[in-house]
Image (cartoon, rainbow, N blue to C red):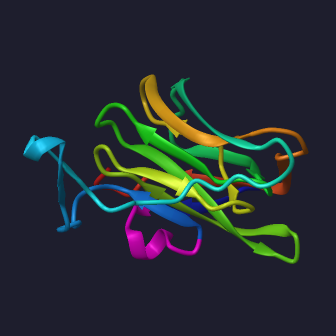
Amino acid sequence: MSRTIYAKPLTREGFAPFGDVIDKSGVDERIPINNGHARRLPPLGEAVSHGPGSKVAISIVEGYPYYCPLRLELVERHPLGSQAFIPLSPQPFLVIVCRDEAGVPGTPQAFITSPYQGVNYHHNVWHGVLTPLDRPQDFLIIDRLGEGSNLEEYKFDCPWEIELPPTA
């Protein structure tokens, strides 16, 4: 038996309880830098790194594709740091999150990104694994490195099925 969740478009408001949407659309403020040859946007998220010997790392991950309907059996969280995924191409990807319910994940919510949208999961937020759709995709990752256990996984007793919206 599986349960079905339908992905919805990723918005700042809908994703706010779980983290930040990294997307320049809708951001009007620009600060001129480099003698006027560039403009900097205000911060779109904050990297967090807790614990002894911790530091913020920047890397690139090559993600292999998933296909929908997606069978969601496992989510994870990182109690000591945030984790950002920024696509390096315009392909959408699937974002899955769950509210914490007394230490375990609640009902999943699924979002589908728009071109070039990224996410920054706040620390300790239950989320699905990196889920590019239909073809390989590269991502810039900003997350925590250091001592201590920064990964918790939870396997659902009954898996969820994630479907894309009809227009995706």
Looking at the image, is 162 positioned above or below residue 130?
below
As drawn, the residue found furthest toward the front would be: 35
Question: Toward the viewer: 4 or 82?
Answer: 82
Q: Which residues are magenta?
A: 8-17
As drawn, the residue found furthest toward the left would be: 36
Q: Is residue 120 visible?
A: yes
Residue 58 image point, x, y percent: 55, 33
Q: Quadrant of residue 133?
A: top left
Residue 160 image point, x, y percent: 69, 56
Describe residue 30's horizontal placement relative to residue 19 as left or right.
left
Looking at the image, is 85 positioned above or below residue 110?
above
Q: Residue at x 65, y 49 (%)?
A: 128
Question: Toward the viewer: 53 or 101?
Answer: 53
**How many numbered callouts?**
0
Q: Residue at x 11, y 43 (%)?
A: 35
Residue 167 image point, x, y percent: 28, 54
Q: Residue at x 9, y 46 (%)?
A: 36
Q: Quadrant of residue 42?
A: bottom left
Q: For residue 13: magenta?
A: yes
Q: Residue at x 35, y 50 (%)?
A: 117
- Quadrant housing the N terminus: bottom right
Looking at the image, is 119 positioned above or below residue 11?
above
Residue 100 image point, x, y percent: 76, 72
Question: Toward the viewer: 6 or 20?
Answer: 20
Q: Is residue 130 visible?
A: no
Describe residue 8's horizontal placement relative to residue 76 as left or right.
left
Q: Quadrant of residue 27?
A: bottom left
Q: For residue 85: magenta?
A: no
